[in-house]
Image (spheres, rainbow, N blue to C red):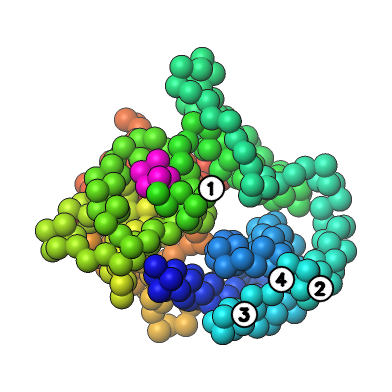
Amino acid sequence: MATHQFDHLSLVVSDAELSLEGLTRSIQGGSVDMQQGALYARDLSGALSVLGLDTAASLLDDVARQLTLGQPSVLDVALGLLPNVASALKDIQLGQILEPDAQLKVLGPWASRLQVLVSRDTASLSSFEAVTPKSTQAQLLGPSDPGFKAMRMKGLSLIQNARIVNQRDDERTVVQMDALLSELQDWTLRIGQVPLSQLFPLSAQAMQDVWLDSTVLDLLDPLREWGTQAGSIQAQSRSLTIYMDWLGLNLSNEEFQQLGQCMSNVLGHVKRLPDGYRLVFPCSLSRMRMTPYVQNGQRYAVGSGQFIQFDPDSNGTGLSGTLTVCSGLANQSFQVARVLPAQNMNIFAVPSDVPNPAGVSGVALDAMGEIYYCLNIV
């Protein structure tokens, strides 16, 4: 069991290093790549939290928020902070984790500097709390509650309309308010969700604060039997996407195919690990992290549960290239003219008055009210 735990931590460290590399590249690109940098910062924060670096994780959360708001004053702080994060990751690989007091001593000055640099940018919104604490103890509403369906059906759409109207103003506050509303949409999604640990109660401690829609949980029910055979199960949620590792498990080819079909049903995918499997899927089919792109003059988007990688062309623009996606076990690659920064989007059925190209399973709506077709990847 200890070996499985070590393997899992090694995978998390590897994820953290990839996010750190991406964040470093984005920050070096200056204001142009701030939105992409925010995504890397949030992923890095999630990985650091799993590794026990709570102080660094909290600080990276703040950095991600300022990058999302487009505040250039955060770039200098991030450039100075990242070497300390890299050093902490190297210490973990050597089996050394700084105590909380030691973490605060190293990172505290950077937290103070960040607060000073961005105070002028956020003064008008100082009364807002953009992020709910990680340890939120939410009391779930039951389906019998009369306000449950109304909040779930209307809440996301009402907030979406507010974001669209908000885009009509050119002031900087608009950007800040949009970021807050986006986070509010994400937290609205939590209403009525259930813990993933309902499927794997024996691994509840390894998947704290991992929530998903009950409809998604029902679709994942076939995982219950296979998961109990794993030596260990670890799960975490980042950007509305759940990453679950099964270690110490070797499925038959038939079982692996069935697992892939289950992941395809929830718009996710599965890949083999040296000692098990990694399952990636969204926490909801109503709102999820999407990667938008343009192909043949039309806007499309693919969910993070199916997005694998983007390989830019060698023309130097970094916008066109080959997009690789995976549904369950089936990989698919195609050429795209342009890839846009990932963002969280609401998902809807295709309206009757919107042309529905073949292979489209729904539409995604971004903050500007633009429509993106969601391909039915098979």
* Image quadrant where one finds the N terminus: bottom left
Q: Nearer the viewer, mark 1 or mark 4?
A: 4
Q: Which residues are the magenta region?
A: 197-201
When the figure is inspected, residue 25 is found, relative to residue 351, above or below; the finding is below
Q: Residues within 10 Å of mark 4 (few under 14, many from 20)?
A: few
Q: Is residue 230 visible?
A: yes
Q: Which residue is mark 3?
A: 96
Marks 3 and 1, how far apart at CA: 26 Å
Please give the residue where the numbered disc 2 appears in the rendered image.
Answer: 105
* Residue type of the residue flagged with mark 1: Asp
Residue at 65% across, 67% down = 53
Mark 4 and mark 3: Cα distance apart in space: 10 Å
Q: Amino acid at mark 2?
A: Lys
Q: Are marks 2 and 4 in contact (CB under 8 Å)?
A: no
> In terms of secondary structure, where does tag 3 sit?
loop
Q: Is residue 219 above or below residue 299?
A: above
Does the magenta portion include 122?
Answer: no
The reply, left or right, for residue 41 in relation to residue 153 is right
From the image, which quarter does the C terminus lie in?
bottom left
Mark earlier in primary sequence (1, 4): 4
The residue labelled by disc 1 is: 209
Percent coordinates x, y for residue 347 in the rendering: 42, 41
Could you give the CA–CA distance between mark 2 and mark 1, rounded to whole angstroms? 28 Å
Tag nearer the camera, 3 or 2: 3
Q: Residue drawn at (54%, 18%), measured in percent from left and top?
A: 147
Q: Amino acid at mark 4?
A: Glu
Residue 271: image location, x then y, percent: 29, 66
Q: CA distance from mark 2 to mark 4?
A: 10 Å
Helix, strand or loop at mark 1: loop
Disc nearer the start of the sequence (2/1): 2
Which mark identifies residue 337?
none
Reading the image, the residue beneath label 4 is 99
